[in-house]
Amino acid sequence: MDDFLKQLPRLAKDKHNENKKFFDKLKKKAPKNMDYIMQDLHDREFKKTDCLTCANCCKTTGPLFTLADIERIAKHFRQKPQQFIDQYLRIDEDNDYVLKSVPCTFLDHENYCMIYDVRPKACREFPHTDRKKFQQISNLTLKNVAICPAAYNIVEEMKKKIPV
């Protein structure tokens, strides 16, 4: 896994133009059963991929925190939302709440999330490969293939399975 993770940014960069063309065509004419195809590809990949052996998303990027996430996590810590914000978050250039630093503050040394049960929605849904109307998030997916080995593999399988 470590070797693949080291190669992943380069692999994603090498495939970027090909993937972008694929997604551009997919946006124009997605198959009617796209959601089913994506759910199947997602399920197959995550039967063989263990996020705990990787955690690259937690080590290299930070999620966006919605107000609902902040309230839920603050409650978990028995804090007021503003205390949680002051301690862990900052506002980024897009005016979103994000972690002050990466790797994620809540990732332990064994790649477990210390707030797993109350983690942000963005973490729960990452890498978003089982999302309905998946073709609508192609820009996000193009970024995620450079971070997540599972997302990379799913996109490679999509290109084999979906004629565009």
Image (spheres, helix red, strand yellow):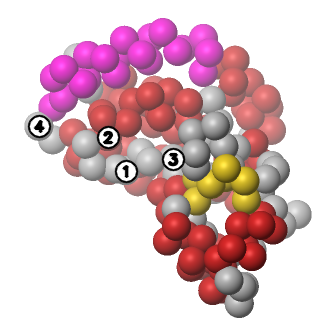
Q: Residue at x 47, y 33 (%)?
A: 141
> Which region of the structure is painted magenta?
12-31
Is residue 61 shown left or right of residue 125? right
Neighbourhood count class around disc 3 (C-alpha, 10 Å): few under 14, some 14–19, many 20 upward? many
Is residue 2 shown left or right of residue 10? right
Type of secondary structure dominating the magenta stretch: helix
Earlier sequence position, callout 4 versus callout 1 = 4
Q: Residue at x 58, y 45 (%)?
A: 95
Figure check: 87 above or below 48: below
Residue type pointed to by label 3: Pro
Front residue (pair 93, 54): 93
Name the disc covering residue 32, or none: 4
Quarter occupied by residue 84: bottom right
**Location of the N terminus (image quadrant):** top right
> Mark 1 — residue?
130
Per the model, the C-alpha gap separating discs 4 and 1 is: 15 Å
> Mark 2 — residue?
134
Disc 1 is placed on an element classified as: loop
Per the model, the C-alpha gap separating discs 2 and 1 is: 7 Å
Per the model, the C-alpha gap separating discs 3 and 1 is: 8 Å
Name the disc covering residue 16, or none: none
Is residue 50 shown left or right of residue 42? right
Q: Is 81 covered by the magenta stretch?
A: no
Circles 2 and 1, Cβ within 8 Å, touching? The answer is yes
